[in-house]
Image: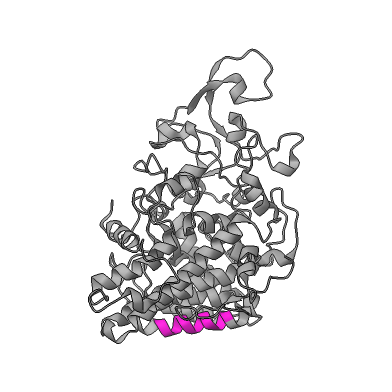
Amino acid sequence: MKHYKIFFGMLVLAAASCTKLDVDVKSRYTSGNFPNNSSSYAAMMGAVYGQLANSTLGDSKYWMNGSGYSYGVDYWLFQELCTDEAIIPARDGNYDDGGKYRFMHLHTWTKDHPYVISTWQWGFTGINLANQAINVLNSPNAGATAGTSIAQMKAMKGLFTFLMMDLYGNIPILDTFPQVTQPATRPRAEVFDYIERTMKSALPGLPANVDGNSYGKPTKWMAFALLEKLYLNAQYYVGTDRNADAVAMADSILSNAPYTLDANYNDVFAPTNGPQVKETILAIPYDANSIPGDHFERFGLHACFVKKYSIPFGPSVALSTIPDFHAYFNLNNDVRNATWLSGPQYNWDGSPLLYATTKKALDATYTGPDGPVNWPVVVSDTLKLKPGFPDKLDVGNDVLGQLMGARSIKYYPDPNANPSSRFASNDIPVFRLADVILMKAEAILRGAAATTVKGELQTPDVLVNKIRTRAHADPVSNVDLQGVLDERARELAWEGWRRNDLIRYGQFENKWGFKTDANVLKRVMPVPATEIALNPKLVQNEGY
């Protein structure tokens, strides 16, 4: 386990008993136990960082059941399954789980959907925990060294609030702890302004260093990246063009931050990734044993890949993509094409990958005599529904059905994954330099002026070709807005930004896969019915 993950995991575990939100701060801290040095501040803030990674804080049984309120599980599935990037079809009823996956794909979710509820609770718990930490750190007893910690907690609060505003639109603003009265729903424009103020107020106190100590925590560059994302979406969020501001935030990073695109794209997402990755602005450190939340190896692969990739458990075969999205990976020599498994599969020596099964287990439509077969593995790029089950999105549970849909190995299989929980150690990036570059290109195409950074006039072509060059793909010429969106699909696949991108481009209502719904009201998620029952000051979003 990497040293920074040991430290991060210790922070999460140290905070495990500090997540109750209705405790008076004054009753929990005395002159004898009040945080008074960098280590005690870090332990107190661990609850906030732990909430972003996961909110179970070591409950292994919870994670073994395949659930969890985390960035890498519920939040990720909530963001991705409603787009063309990811799908979990049913397989003879398996993986239907009450319809929660197909409801996301078909855009038929309701105010009672499990992800609607769990993600709301996860995000607003994170905001409350950050406010709690700020409250403590603002005490006169905290000392002068608390300034950086306060700034980092403000930035974490801004991040959680941004994620909630992006999903739910009009949301309550939580700016104090404890929350004396029930908070009311505020207009999205007001929340937008609050996020902007919060991040700007945090900036002066945030560290600029980029190393193992700052990895997984807010820095100045993280604040600039979040503000760039906020401004790029401002036309959709609040009806105001802030593209020039988005470019300014990008330039704050490109001109001053010590980030570079890593030479090897795959290194950015490998199980050995970490502070040595030179383009990661904010990542969530995950560890197979102490920080659960990386589910990609478990949910997306098949038993036929166990030996080839040294997977120490039986994968679940559930998670894949649809042909519409996989079609973006069509550029000559693009290394990102190899992040998907599709078509005939081979061993490392070039021989066909064989899977021992039976004729009927391979193909449920087979009517001849059964018997063993060593089947040359083929991952189908299509998703063909079983006859008579169109409403269930069921592709069948024979081997052919299990291997329908291209499989991602972008988060490369971890041979040291936990065989019990089946979670791995790949850190998941939230913000990275490639996203900053592509957002700047888009903002310029939307009307902002191109700027010069370090003597280079950065036009959209220049910016996109930085990404293309690293990917070994052919360069672009006269790239347009659609071209940038397509490049974002290739570069940022399965990083949790596709829904945000499609909405900004007005394409969230398009048809893809088995989805035909074109209701623009689905651009925001419903407020959970359970939350409105508890707090009548919350207002349900239109259409729900």
**Quadrant in which the C terminus is drawn:** bottom right
Is residue 200 located in the magenta-colored stretch of the structure?
A: yes
Q: Is residue 117 above or below residue 64?
A: below
Residue 225 in sight here = no
* Residue 437 pos. (x, y %): 48, 69
Along the line of sight, the residue nearer the viewer: 20 or 512: 20
Q: Is residue 447 above or below residue 48?
A: below
The colouring scheme, among rainbow, by chain, secondary structure or one colour, is one colour
Along the line of sight, the residue nearer the viewer: 231 or 416: 416
Is residue 9 located in the magenta-colored stretch of the structure?
A: no
Residue 434 in sight here = yes
Q: Main secondary structure of the magenta part?
A: helix
Residue 449 as seen in the image, left or right of residue 14 = right
Q: Residue at x 27, y 77 (%)?
A: 30
Along the line of sight, the residue nearer the viewer: 148 or 412: 148
Q: Residue at x 65, y 54 (%)?
A: 104
Q: Which quarter of the picture shows residue 118? A: bottom right
Residue 141 as seen in the image, left or right of residue 361 = left
Q: Which quarter of the picture shows residue 312? A: top left
* Residue 126 pos. (x, y %): 46, 68
Q: Is residue 366 above or below residue 331?
A: above
Residue 41 as seen in the image, left or right of residue 236 = left
* Residue 541 pos. (x, y %): 69, 70
Residue 320 as seen in the image, left or right of residue 251 = right
Q: Residue at x 33, y 65 (%)?
A: 215
* Residue 145 pos. (x, y %): 26, 81
Question: Which region of the structure is painted magenta?
Answer: 191-202
